[in-house]
Image: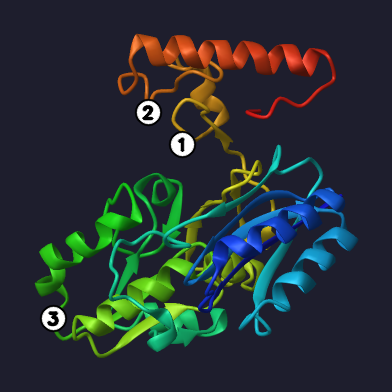
Amino acid sequence: MYILAALYHFTPFDDPDGLRPALKALCAEHGITGSLLIAREGINGTIAGPRAGIDAVLAHIRALPGCAALDWKEATSDHPPFARMKVRLKREIVTMGQPQVDPQAGTGHYVEPQDWNDLIRSPDVVVIDTRNDYEVAIGTFEGAIDPETASFRDFPAWWEANRERFHNKRVAMFCTGGIRCEKSTNYLLGEGVEDVYHLKGGILRYLEEMPAEDSTWQGECFVFDNRVSVGHGLVEGPHALCHGCRRPILPKDMTRPEYEAGVSCHHCIDETSPEDKARFRERQKQITLARARGQEHLAG
């Protein structure tokens, strides 16, 4: 059994690169895999491994400057969720490309999962999904607006083009675990929107705490590990990942003529060049050979 811990925390780090060696060493010592992003604005990531190892890494992060209040969400998996451990230095721990945005200066009103349904059903509330288009495609809240953005960087431009649609409305926003809403709600406050709300703990906490019979969630929630998607109770969903484009696909999609394991699916068949596909085929060949030897290929 593998424990997964999804975490983020905004706090100023004077020397984020200096934090990486100790984190990498600790993760290696305890057999922890996953990804941690460190920037001057804080830390973000998902890690997986044995209980003792997860506890050791979380204790280390909580001891970092300003991280005593670190919060995280846990889940379990029967198979390794990640192939390796990455600890990366980034400009932002979630990339929005808006230097003036500072969640530490203020965010929207947090809404607990048990209060979310009443809020989003209010006639004066508009509900906005801040995730990327491929995430929204497999599940979202009833009545939510999909900005159809390819990346979080696109959200400010979408808002500028659509803001008049939401005049005199309260704005409720949500994302997978809450981190994108920390920035998007601060952004809207800076744009003069007074009544801004966001789902505390994100979709994952809602799915964990809200009974399916009382839920306003429709579909599955995309997650950034080998589970690919989860449903209510954080039960692993039916989706797999196309390793050509990193989009979620269903088992039935693997029977389509556009699908080739590790190379393409119906989403990306026309998006990559013959040279790309040849490279992907070679990668898939190496993954298959590694598995035949009982090894785990880094890309697989």
Q: Position of residue 277 (x, y in %)?
A: 43, 13
Image quarter for residue 118?
Answer: bottom left
At 79% from the left edge and 73% from the top edge, which residue is drawn?
A: 59
At 42% from the left edge and 66% from the top edge, which residue is drawn?
A: 180
Front-most of 251 and 37?
A: 37
Instruction: Kindly state the secondary structure of the residue where label 2 is placed.
Output: loop
What residue is pinned by disc 1? Answer: 247
What residue is pinned by disc 2? Answer: 267
Callout 2, which amino acid?
His
Callout 1, which amino acid?
Arg
**Which of the two marks, 3 or 1, is nearer to us in this view?**
1
Q: Earlier in the sequence, mark 2 or mark 1?
A: 1
Front-most of 164 and 35?
A: 35
What residue is pinned by disc 3? Answer: 167
In the rendered structure, the answer to whether residue 65 lies left or right of residue 54 reads: left
Q: Position of residue 52 (x, y in %)?
A: 90, 62
Instruction: Kindly state the secondary structure of the residue where label 1 is placed.
Output: loop
In the rendered structure, the answer to whether residue 139 lies left or right of residue 231 reads: left
Instruction: Kindly state the secondary structure of the residue where label 3 is placed.
Output: loop
